[in-house]
Image (cartoon, grey):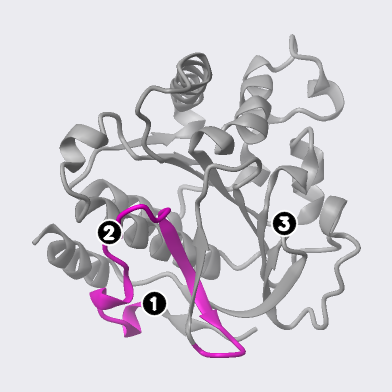
Amino acid sequence: MRFRALDSFAADLFLTHVPRTPLAACIGLSDESGEPLRLPFRESEHSNVMIVGRSGAAAFGIFSSMLLDLASQILTTPDRREIYTTPPFSILDFCGDEESRIFTNAAMSLPVPVKLEYATDTALNTLTDFQFELSRRQREPSAPRHAKFLFLCGLQAAHGVRARGFYASPDANPLAARFSQLLRAGAAQSLHTIICCNSFTNIDLTLADGIDSFDHVIILNDAGIPSGQISSIEIESTDQAWYINVRQNSVTPLIPFTVPSQAWCDAVIRTLAN
């Protein structure tokens, strides 16, 4: 699988605010055009992102690129302090390895509020926060709202949100029901979830709806056999990374980014802050 080092780019890779345009996030380069490939986050059902595969370097490279691209647009939004009244980014980290720490350290260095939970040590309070916000937005559809993003690192280790097998009963794992509701209804309220998982098998073992809550699917190496709504989409080669737009039924060959250095993240964040 071909990669591109994210830290081979300058901060001008990332977008700035464009009025009346949805936020968008860069996930890598199109292997057809060589141009940056971006996902728009519209208020629409299932506008969530799943990254599947065993390359942590690529998964957290994509996470880092998405985070910094979104942050650049938020930081250049006029009156952002009045608009973004709650943290635009939340992170549940089930990995805790070196690659995820580069991503989480970058997030916590941003000049915007970020909520981070090392999920093995907490009660997953982030899910409670998103559940409250989802209920408020459904109850007050005309009230102002801004996009919020939940990054979940390592779904394969997220036993607290498992909703299959023994955990299928809400009584066995009440947090799973909250998470399922967020995936089903959150994106239509600008509450978007971005997940990385090491295989399709672990997605199917964990999520009640499997891959079917995700309009955007990125397939990396050793992901296994695609399931659910994308099982009928033809993938030409397993040695290539792919971006699947489920709503448009399109497949694009992708050159994903690899996780950048901490020094590069710090330099880019200083640029964004200015």
From the top left corner, tell me how far across and down residue 254 is, in percent: 61, 79
Residue 50, relative to residue 272: is it above or below? above
Furthest toward the top, the residue is 171
As rendered, which of 86 and 110 lies closer to the eye?
A: 86
Q: Amino acid at mark 2?
A: His
User: Which residue is situated farthest in the right direction here?
Assistant: 232
Task: Between residue 264 and residue 180, name the one nearer to us.
Answer: 180
Residue receiving disc 2: 17
186 relative to 5, above or below: above
Is residue 118 rendered to the left or right of residue 180? left
Q: Position of residue 36 (x, y in %)?
A: 46, 79
Give the CA distance from mark 3 to mark 1: 28 Å
Bounds of the magenta segment: 6-34
Q: Earlier in the sequence, mark 3 or mark 1?
A: 1
Q: Which residue is mark 1?
A: 6
Q: Which mark is residue 102?
A: none
Queried whether the magenta region covers residue 20, the answer comes back as yes
Q: Which residue shows up at 40% across the image and 54% down it?
A: 23
Q: Of the residues under marks 1 and 2, which one precedes in the sequence?
A: 1
Q: Is residue 35 above or below residue 197?
A: below
Quick one: quadrant of the N terminus?
bottom right
Residue on which disc 3 sits = 247
Q: Image quadrant for the C terminus?
A: bottom left
Viewer-proximal residue among 78 and 27: 78
Of all residues shown, which one is farthest toward the left? 274
- Rendered image quadrant of residue 156: top right
Q: Is residue 150 left or right of residue 242?
A: left
User: Which comes before the other along the chain, label 2 or label 3?
Assistant: 2
